[in-house]
Amino acid sequence: MNSIILLAGTRALSGLLLLFSLYMLLRGHNEPGGGFIGGLIGSTGFVLYAIACGAEDARRALRVPPQNIAMAGLGIALLAGLASVVFGDPLFTGQWLFIGGTKEEGGLPFSSILVFDIGVYLVVFGSVLTLVFAMEEEI
Amino acid sequence: MSAAKTEASASGNGWVGLVPVALAASLFVWFLSFVPQIGAGEVVRLSWDWVPSLGIALSFLFDGLSLTFALLISGIGTLVLLYSNTYLAGHPQYARFALFLTSFMLAMLGLVLADNLIAIFVFWELTTITSYLLIGFGHETYKGRRSALQALFVTGAGALAMLAGFILLGFSMGSFELSEILAQGDALKAHAMYLPILILILAGTFTKSAQFPFHFWLPNAMAAPTPVSAFLHSATMVKGGVYLMARLHPGMAGTDVWFWTLTVAGAFTAVFASFLALRQTDLKQALAYTTLMALGTLTLFLGQTSAYAMTAFAAFLIVHSLYKAGLFLVVGCIDHGTGTREADILGGLARAMPVTAAAAALSALSMAGVPPFLGFIGKELKYAGALEVQAMETVVVGALVLANALMLAVAAVVAYRPFWRPAGGAMPHTPHEAPWPMLAGPVILAVLGAFFGLFPGVLQWALVDPTVAALTGGDLHAKELKLWAGVNMPLILSAVTVALGLAIYAGHRSLRAALIRATDAGPNFDRGWDRFLEGLKALAAWQTRVLQSGQLRSYIFTVFATVLVGLGGTILARGVWQGFPDLSGVTWMNVALMALILIGAIMAAITRSRITAIASLGASGIGVAMIFIAFGAPDVAITQLLVETLVVVLVAYALLRLPQLDRPGERDWRPWDAVLALGVGAVVTVTLLAVLATPFDRRLTTYFETASWPEAFGRNIVNVILVDFRALDTFGEIAVVVIAALSAYALLRTTTDKAAKPATQKDKAS
């Protein structure tokens, strides 16, 4: 598709969408959002890019094949689930760490839950792009 | 292969050939070690849990019946494996053959030793599959493939019926353990489900043991290499059905339906098969039909409950396995030494193949039922058993005399003519004696037949008594096996049999010609089978044409029409309509959203432009997302919006680039679609209203609301459920997402890298 307006708009929008997707991912535990929504928003950024510039350029911009991203996400989610076994809990039990103080003192929370959500994000992001790029190139 | 055969030597196929022999032999010895215990009347039971939640255990039972079978299988298996190692020496696929044959033997052993119905079924099917592979070992020929498939279909179909019977039996009696079921035989016989169980199980055993009218697969199975025929069709596979009937005998026998079914089917099969045996000129085919006769006789005796009949069953089971395996192996030696199995050509082999001739003579005399061989004792017991049949004794005795006389004639055709009469034509090879590993089997089996004839007491104590005890649940004692029982009715019948048999042999050529004319005129089950298969294929082709039109819209139409009829019918039948709901709470905002969704849907339905349709569907979807927002589910709303966006992109990619296949209105008639769409919509609406009218169980919601923050440190319940409370489910779901994406990718990327560069360039340009 050759549209100057779309091309110019994409420049700004793609980056914003990616940034916004990370915001949605990180706030997901307490506000609307999360890995699934984040992944969808992030992939929209690249889908827009693929519509404007073609799947080949989008692939180049992504640098990594999307199916690898999806597989990596699955692996990260699995590791996050397995982490609890190391601490003696049943599989997929959340593990929490509060950096710089306890939960009540307002320490920065870090958890295996977040890692798992990042895995979900990557799976959704990679899978959608795998599909969209293949559709764009093959049909 | 014939070149390989002539080079056959004792060296065989190296360790690949010898390991299975050693395995079978050690199993045989192990089973032999049970003889003193079982002979003393004990029963040994070994059990391991398998699927404890379903009451399925891997349990094995060693009693007289299973031990007799286990000894026959492992003993004959050893000899057959030793024999094959030379018979197929240097065959490029010998390793495969040995694997199949050994697996078959192990499956068969599992079948006869298992004490659990489900385990029996599993082993039963394993023997079906391995025998399919063995019969189809010569898969290069059409005949080999057809025979293997035929055996698989016939026995497999029977096995499925049998599985249904087993399940009924297990649930009716409250246990899948055979020993427990058989212990309450009277309850079983009185059970309302007795008849269905019996019919289903007999469907399995009759197909496996090739009882009329399922007999046709067995002679075709002779397409297998001769050692396979010797193993499968003498002692083992076909006797699997007989074994199961014998195993169930203490629990199920004694009713009228059991007696009549088994007696009539058995007697008819025995006589019918004996005539067909005489019709054959191929020695192996002739033996195959005599096996049918033996199976018929065994079935006939299992129909009875008297001590004589049970003893006759046990004795004839052993006799038949010994002489039939021996004769099959002899035929293999003849084939190996001369290159043919045609009775009319073979002759004068006694000089060139003296050991084979001797083994053949001994086995054939046992088969013919001549004293002092074990076959004679078996035949006397058969007559004694037949004289005690509940009803129609004359018919049964007459059938047995006729069948045995024909047996004698066939024995002469197989073991006398080829060796002692002048040749009828030129044989492909100059006859030569087989090497020792091929002679070991026939000789050992023939000598055993003579030995047990002279010393029946050994067999009586070791196997016959415990088998009869197992068959009758310990109620009856076996009759004595003895060569001379004085001048009685069985002896007179034996004399009649021998005279009749010799007369038939004398006139067997003209009788054969008459039989060929008669059978050609009668119904041919084998051709009937072909017609049945063709009919089945035609039916499959027809229903595929009707159901699988290849048009997406007709599939979708079928799916929705099914939903309409199924769901709508249920709604009408159950009367779930609750009346119109209370609409007082509906705001103008809701109405506006409804209007957006409706307009989008209607536009998508009536437009002729694809891009309009896609965009309209998108608008509809956004309306749905806004409803989620209006009712306070932002997470669902965001997801819905994003998914709608991506779906529009994906559908646009696909639809806008596909060529226009039909002119509008050419195949579809839209008013009809509209009726269907409105109908499905109405049905779904009514269903949803009915669902909403039932009180909502808030226990889970309350739990998550209260536990989300204290236990998972999150306020967004939806996300907390996704990534913490139900993280394992989510993991399963994202795995599905990845798999779906990769599968779609693989499907789409059929043209690999070809499209990646030039095609996208072109697309961009257009």
Image: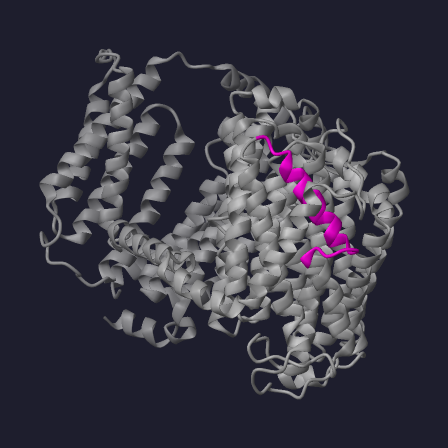
- Residue B303 visible at all: yes
Q: In this picture, is B344 found above or below B242?
A: below
B233 with respect to B697 (left or right): right
Q: In this picture, is B294 found above or below B17?
A: above
- Residue B438 visible at all: no
Where is residue B133 drawn, in percent x and y? 59, 62
Coloring scheme used: one colour
Q: In this picture, is B430 found above or below B501?
A: below
Where is residue A110 drawn, in percent x and y? 65, 38
Q: How many marks?
A: 0
Q: Which residues are magenta?
A: B368-390
Magenta stretch: includes residue B379: yes
- The residue nearer to you, when weighing A124 against B578, is B578
Residue lying at 89% horizontally and 47% vertically, measured from the top left:
B33
Q: Quadrant location of the N terminus of chain B?
A: bottom right
Magenta stretch: includes residue B133: no
Residue lying at 64% horizontally and 63% vertically, measured from the top left:
B411
Where residue B474 sits, quadrant-wise, is top right
Where is residue A7 drawn, in percent x and y? 31, 61
B543 with respect to B476 (left or right): left
Where residue B47 sits, quadrant-wise, is top right
Residue lying at 65% horizontally and 26% vertically, measured from the top left:
B175
Secondary structure that dominates the magenta span: helix
Where is residue B216 drawn, in percent x and y? 48, 56
B566 with respect to B329 (left or right): left
